[in-house]
Amino acid sequence: MPTDCYYVDVPVRWSDMDAYGHVNNVMFVRLLEDARVYALRDWFGHDRDLIDDGLLVARQEIDYLAPMTFNYRPARITMWCSRVSGASFDIAYAVGQADSDVTYALAEVTLVAYDLQAEQPRRLTGPERSALAAVAGEPARLRSRSRGTR
């Protein structure tokens, strides 16, 4: 993970817990999505919104590393761009908390730039590529990669 990564603190809700008192695995996806909304706005500028322009989730992969429990502290979602191609890019994530060395999950999502009017993927623009390059880092160290399945 790059040392100067972008991060967002996202509240963990009591309702995010499962029957075992841990943040439910599905709620991790919500935490990532909430953080991504803020990141994209900051990365691409406050005067436009890549989400409104058209952006689809094509793939998500999460490694759950430790149980996260409710404790009134927000989750700190650290993120960076780990890959850029013609019409898509990956965002890597590490889920922790500001005052803890514990990483609860690592994740990566593939997003596709999408032309809503034409209803088809579109190429990333030069400015979009530059914005992603400014927050670039290595891919997340997901278990599937260590097994050579990806």
Image (spheres, helix red, strand yellow):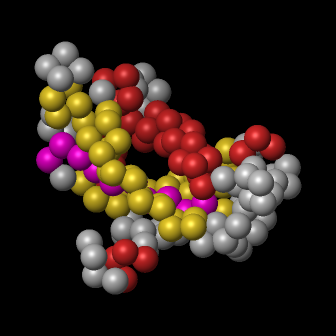
Question: Front-most of 126 and 120?
Answer: 120
Task: Answer whether residue 12 is magenta in the image.
Answer: no
- 13 lies above or below 85: above
Q: Residue furthest top?
A: 117
Q: Residue at x 66, y 63 (%)?
A: 96
- 26 lies above or below 140: above
Question: Front-most of 113 and 44?
Answer: 113
Residue 129 at x, y percent in the picture: 25, 46
Q: Is residue 50 left or right of residue 98?
A: left
Q: Residue at x 30, y 27 (%)?
A: 54
Identify the magenta region.
86-95
Q: Residue at x 23, y 46 (%)?
A: 88
- 49 lies above or below 105: above
Q: Is residue 28 left or right of residue 84?
A: right
Residue 60 at x, y percent in the picture: 39, 53
Residue 115 at x, y percent in the picture: 20, 25
Q: Residue furthest right?
A: 71
Question: Front-most of 49 and 111?
Answer: 111
Task: Answer whether residue 94 is magenta in the image.
Answer: yes
Identify the image quadrant of residue 128.
top left
Residue 109 at x, y percent in the picture: 39, 53
Is the magenta region chiefly helix, strand or loop?
strand
Q: Residue at x 78, y 65 (%)?
A: 99
Q: Is residue 96 left or right of residue 4?
A: right
Question: Front-most of 101 and 109?
Answer: 109
* Res. 5 visible in picture: no
